[in-house]
Image (tube, rainbow, N blue to C red):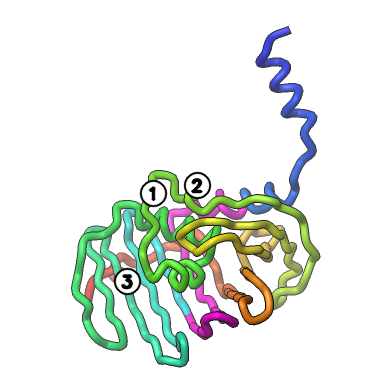
C-alpha cells in the first residue's frame, strides 16, 4: 500500500465544508475575471464611524477606477483614484495628490480585498496602505467556515456563510459573515465584527450590481 494511496483515502474521507466551497467558488470567479465592477454602501459603527458610497471598476493590466464619497469620523470625504496600468492619480476632496507608479499587483489586490476583507475595512484599518505580498490571498487568511441562514438581500435569496479573518493589515481577528448569491456566486453583502460593547466595531458593506467580465472602455482609465 503506497503512502500516496493512504493520503488520498484520508483526504477523501474528510467531510466537505460547504461554506468554504461556496466561498472558494465566489473568490475563484473574481480572480478569473477580466473585469470587476460594483457599487457599495458601507457603514462603520463603534470605534470609528463612517458612511460611504463607493464605486469600483477594475480590469486586468492593473487598471482601476475608484470613487468614494461620504463621511469618516464626522468629516466629509471625497476620493477618486484612477490607474491607467502604469501610473495612478488620486484626487482628495477635489485636490490633486499627484501621480505615482502603479503597484504591479493592483488588479490582484482589488480582487483579494473584494473577496476577503472588503475595501472599506482594509482602507480604514490599514490607513490606506496597499497590501504588498507575493500571496495576496494568503495575507488575509480565513478560517472556521460554517454555513449560516438563507436570507433575502434585495430580490435575491442569498446564502450566508460565517468565518474568521485575521491579519495585521486589518488589526487583528474579525468575525465575518458573507452573503452570496448561490446561483451566480456573486457577493451581495459583508459584515465584519470585532470586540463587544464600548470596544466593539462593526463594518457593513452592501453590494449593488456586481458584475464580472463586462466589456469596459479603456477611456474610463485615462488619468485626469
Answer with the quarter of the image where residue 166 lies.
bottom right
Lower position in the chain sequence, tag 2 or tag 3: 2
* Circle 2/circle 1 CB separation < 8 Å: yes
Residue 141 located within the stretch drawn in magenta = no
Over which residues does the magenta segment extend? 25-53
**Residue 58 is drawn in which quadrant?**
bottom left
- Against 145, residue 219 (above or below) is below
How far across and how far down the image is residue 87, in percent? 22, 63
Residue at 53% from the left image edge and 76% from the top image edge: 40
- Looking at the image, residue 218 sits to the left or right of residue 194; the answer is left
Looking at the image, the residue that sits furthest to the front is 198
Crowd tier of the residue under label 3, counting other residues whose Cα lies within 10 Å: few below 14, some 14–19, many 20 or above: some
The answer to which of marks 3 and 1 sits earlier in the sequence is 1
> In the picture shown, does residue 159 fall above or below 47?
above
Q: Nearer the viewer, residue 210 or 192?
A: 192
Distance between the alpha carbons at the discs numbered 3 and 1:
27 Å
Which residue is label 3 attached to?
A: 220
- Give the residue pinned by disc 1: 133
Give me the C-alpha separation between circle 2 and circle 1: 8 Å
Q: Residue at x 29, y 66 (%)?
A: 83
Report the number of numbered marks.
Answer: 3
Q: Is 188 placed above or below 138 here?
A: below
Say if residue 32 shows up in the picture: no
Q: Residues within 10 Å of mark 1 (few under 14, many from 20)?
A: few
Q: Nearer the viewer, mark 2 or mark 3?
A: 2
Quarter of the figure that contains the C terminus: bottom left
Q: Which residue is painted at 30% across and 65% down in the image? A: 218
Q: Which mark is residue 138?
A: 2
- Out of 24 and 60, give the one closest to the viewer: 24
Tell me the SS state at disc 2.
loop
Amino acid at each position: 500500500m503506497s503512502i500516496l494511496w493512504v493520503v488520498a483515502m484520508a483526504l477523501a474521507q474528510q467531510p466537505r465544508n460547504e461554506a468554504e466551497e461556496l466561498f472558494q467558488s465566489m473568490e475563484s470567479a473574481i480572480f478569473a475575471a477580466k473585469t470587476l465592477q460594483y457599487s457599495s454602501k458601507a457603514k462603520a459603527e463603534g470605534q470609528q464611524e463612517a458612511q460611504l458610497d463607493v464605486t469600483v471598476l477594475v480590469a486586468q493590466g492593473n487598471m482601476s477606477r475608484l470613487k468614494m464619497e461620504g463621511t469618516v469620523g464626522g468629516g466629509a470625504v471625497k476620493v477618486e483614484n484612477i490607474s491607467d496600468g502604469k501610473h495612478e492619480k488620486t484626487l482628495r476632496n477635489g485636490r490633486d495628490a499627484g501621480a505615482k507608479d502603479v503597484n504591479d499587483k493592483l488588479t490582484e489586490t482589488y480582487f483579494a480585498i473584494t473577496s476577503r476583507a472588503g475595501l472599506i475595512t482594509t482602507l480604514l484599518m490599514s490607513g490606506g496602505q496597499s497590501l504588498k505580498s507575493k500571496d495576496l490571498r494568503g495575507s488575509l487568511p480565513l478560517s472556521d467556515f460554517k454555513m449560516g441562514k438563507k436570507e433575502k438581500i434585495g430580490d435575491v435569496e442569498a446564502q450566508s456563510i460565517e468565518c474568521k479573518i485575521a491579519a495585521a493589515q486589518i488589526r487583528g481577528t474579525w468575525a465575518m459573515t458573507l452573503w452570496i448569491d448561490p446561483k451566480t456566486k456573486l457577493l451581495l453583502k459583508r459584515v465584519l465584527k470585532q470586540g463587544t460593547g464600548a470596544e466593539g466595531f462593526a463594518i457593513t458593506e452592501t453590494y449593488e450590481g456586481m458584475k464580472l467580465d463586462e466589456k469596459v472602455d479603456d477611456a474610463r482609465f485615462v488619468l485626469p
